[in-house]
Amino acid sequence: MSGVGENEKQCSREAERLNEVLPVNLQPDDVEKYPEFIKLLTVLTKYINPQCITVETEKDLIQSKEILHHTKLTWLLNQILYHEVKELILEYKIKGQDVSLCSDDKKFVEILQKCLNYKEIVHYLDFSPDPSVKATLLGLTNEDVHRHNPYKKHITSLQLRLIPEIEDRLRKKCEDLVHYEDPNSHSVGNRLTLAKASQLPATVEILKNKLEDEERLLKQDRIRREKQFWVYYQSLVDALVLLEKLIQDYRLQEQTESDRITSKWLKARCDTMSLKIRLIQLQVLCDTYSSETVKALRIIKKHVEETTDIAEKDLSRISQALTAYDSVGMGFESLVDEYSKLRSELENKRWAMTELQHSVN
């Protein structure tokens, strides 16, 4: 058993080693199942790197990067000096607008401007974007431009004054950068400030790498949080589905059965109450209309019916009389008065009949 455990650990270590040096994702089982393939991968580690680039190509790539870095650094240095000279000339010109420059300053600015112009011309000679093309602007060369520069004899004296001024300006800018990067460095001496300025590129590089690492960690954290969110979201969806199923299978079915039983019970209770009410109604009727009361009510009914017959006969007679009076017309006042009396009597008879009918009912 100990031998089996040791073999598994060895396979796991071998898989981890190959995963680190090669872009593969081996499992410990793969090492045990495919030993020849593992030997091939081990041999390949001598010739390629984790990015699947051969060792020779990686060396050439590193060398090319170093050459490119040196070329870029040289170009940047030249650009810094060029812009610094342009700024120096511009400052002298602005100063000349306020106060009159001395003859030495005027001569210095004029020679510096002309020399700079001749240097700028050199950059325009190679006008073709194709580096293999040897043709130049108007067929001129760098030597031709330098040979026709009338100020080349002043370059040495020009440099004696220009270099210290450029160095002072650059030193001042470096100090400003150091103060900007570290506001507490104002109390430090000039030598320490220059020392910090020389270390400023490394400091900026460290800060840049730190920011890139933090950005990478933030991206990883965001990806992790997004994965956690979707896992949490899926868990919620599964929980809702399960809850819905539980509600449908148990709560709703049980509630339906409970409602059905409750409705039956309520219906039976309602029928019982209706029967009780009907029984009470019959008991009230029985208590109200006894045999003696019924006999009395029959006598009263007979009397009412006889009175009703008499009233109907009187109503018929009066109606016939009214009809006769209506046919005579409105020529006789006595007939009108009698008509009014009869109509009033008819209304009284009708009211009496209505009251008798209500009492009978």
Image (cartoon, rainbow, N blue to C red):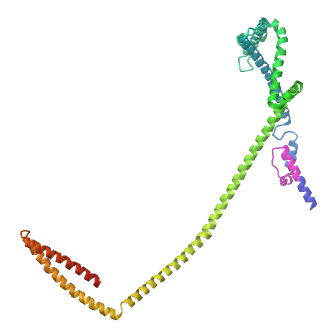
Residue 68: x and y in percent read 81, 27
Quadrant where the N terminus is found in the figure: bottom right
Residue 337: x and y in percent read 11, 73
Up-down relation of residue 152 to residue 194 (above or below): above
Q: Residue furthest right?
A: 2
Q: Is residue 12 magenta?
A: yes
Q: Which residues are magenta?
A: 11-35
Look at 76% across and 19% down and name the residue there: 83
* 208, 137: nearer the viewer: 208
* 157, 181: nearer the viewer: 181
| Residue 263 appears left or right of 86 | left
Look at 16% across and 75% down and name the residue there: 343
Residue 164: x and y in percent read 84, 15
| Majority secondary structure in the magenta region | helix
Look at 83% across and 12% down and name the residue there: 161
* Res 297 → quadrant: bottom left
* Res 194 → quadrant: top right
Residue 252: x and y in percent read 59, 69
